[in-house]
Image (tube, rainbow, N blue to C red):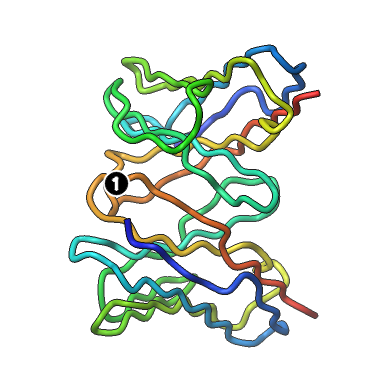
């Protein structure tokens, strides 16, 4: 299983772009990079997934460099409702999915 | 379509008792995973079931067990409850549990052991 490292917490002002970087130096060839968001007392919610280069959806963008040893989740123009914990997962095949501690993002008015 | 349903939402048990939690996955999903979440420990993987078979297992003692039925509904059981078992228990379902399919989580069951 690829181990991931991400900041424990981040603060951002409303309206700013937030970038959360995740390191996964021993990512395997068949591993995908997936990000989830979790609000207090709720289950995590899928945000975005990618394998390489850049992926964008209506919520976020995911940047993955060529060596795939890291990835960056980009949230454009955050609002107070984006305050949550964000998890970076690296999993391949049918391996067990481990979430870890995640990054607690606090959006400040 | 209906989401993942977990029952009950809240539960209070006494040390030494046992408890059974239920998870109904999204229709058509065959993989169900269970997680324990406590403050400071994040989400910890318990086990995953696919087609009634446990396919993956986390590092939890044998007091934690689970099963999956032919309709993909799953239950997890914790025997001889300890105070440290107090947590939010989450289940997630996905089509087949592969890494490139999205997992959908339920609201969780909040277990308090007193």
Residue at horizontal 30 percent and vertical 20 percent from the top: B52
Residue A106 vertical placement versus B96 (above, below): below
Q: Give the farthest residue toward the bottom.
A: A16
Residue at horizontal 57 percent and vertical 28 percent from the top: B6
Residue A8 vertical placement versus B106 (above, below): below
Q: Is residue A73 left or right of residue B52?
A: right
> Which quadrant of the figure contains the C terminus of chain A?
bottom right
Residue A21 vertical placement versus A88 (above, below): below
Residue B99 vertical placement versus B70 (above, below): below
Tell me the SS state at disc 1.
loop
Residue B5 position by quadrant = top right
Residue at horizontal 47 percent and vertical 41 percent from the top: B45
Q: Give the farthest residue toward the top.
A: B17
Residue B11 position by quadrant = top right
- Residue B95 in percent (x, y) is at 30, 39
- Residue A2 in percent (x, y) is at 33, 61
Q: Is residue B70 left or right of residue A37?
A: left
Badge 1: chain ID = A
Pointer 1: what residue?
Answer: A95
- Residue B33 in percent (x, y) is at 42, 36
Residue at horizontal 26 percent and vertical 55 percent from the top: A92
Circle 1 crowding by C-alpha within 10 Å: few under 14, some 14–19, many from 20: some
> Which quadrant of the figure contains the N terminus of chain A?
bottom left
Q: Is residue A20 left or right of residue A93?
A: right
């Amino acid at each position: 299983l690829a181990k991931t490292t991400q900041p424990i917490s981040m603060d951002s002002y409303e309206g700013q772009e937030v970038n959360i970087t995740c390191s996964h130096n021993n990512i395997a060839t068949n591993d995908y990079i997936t990000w989830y968001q979790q609000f207090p007392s709720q289950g995590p919610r899928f945000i975005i997934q990618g394998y390489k280069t850049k992926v964008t959806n209506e919520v976020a963008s995911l940047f993955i460099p060529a060596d795939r040893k890291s990835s960056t989740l980009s949230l454009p123009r955050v609002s107070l409702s984006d305050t949550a914990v964000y998890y970076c997962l690296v999993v391949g095949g049918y391996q067990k999915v481990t979430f870890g501690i995640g990054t607690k993002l606090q959006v400040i008015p | 379509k209906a989401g993942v349903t977990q029952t009950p939402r809240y539960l209070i048990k006494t040390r030494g008792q046992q408890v059974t939690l239920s998870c109904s996955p999204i229709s058509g999903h065959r993989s169900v995973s269970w997680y324990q979440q406590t403050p400071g420990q994040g989400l910890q993987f318990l086990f995953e079931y696919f087609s009634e078979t446990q396919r993956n297992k986390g590092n939890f003692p044998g007091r934690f067990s689970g099963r999956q039925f032919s309709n993909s509904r799953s239950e997890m059981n914790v025997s001889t409850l300890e105070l440290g078992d107090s947590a939010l228990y989450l289940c997630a379902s996905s089509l087949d549990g592969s890494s490139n399919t999205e997992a959908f989580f339920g609201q969780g069951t909040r277990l308090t052991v007193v």
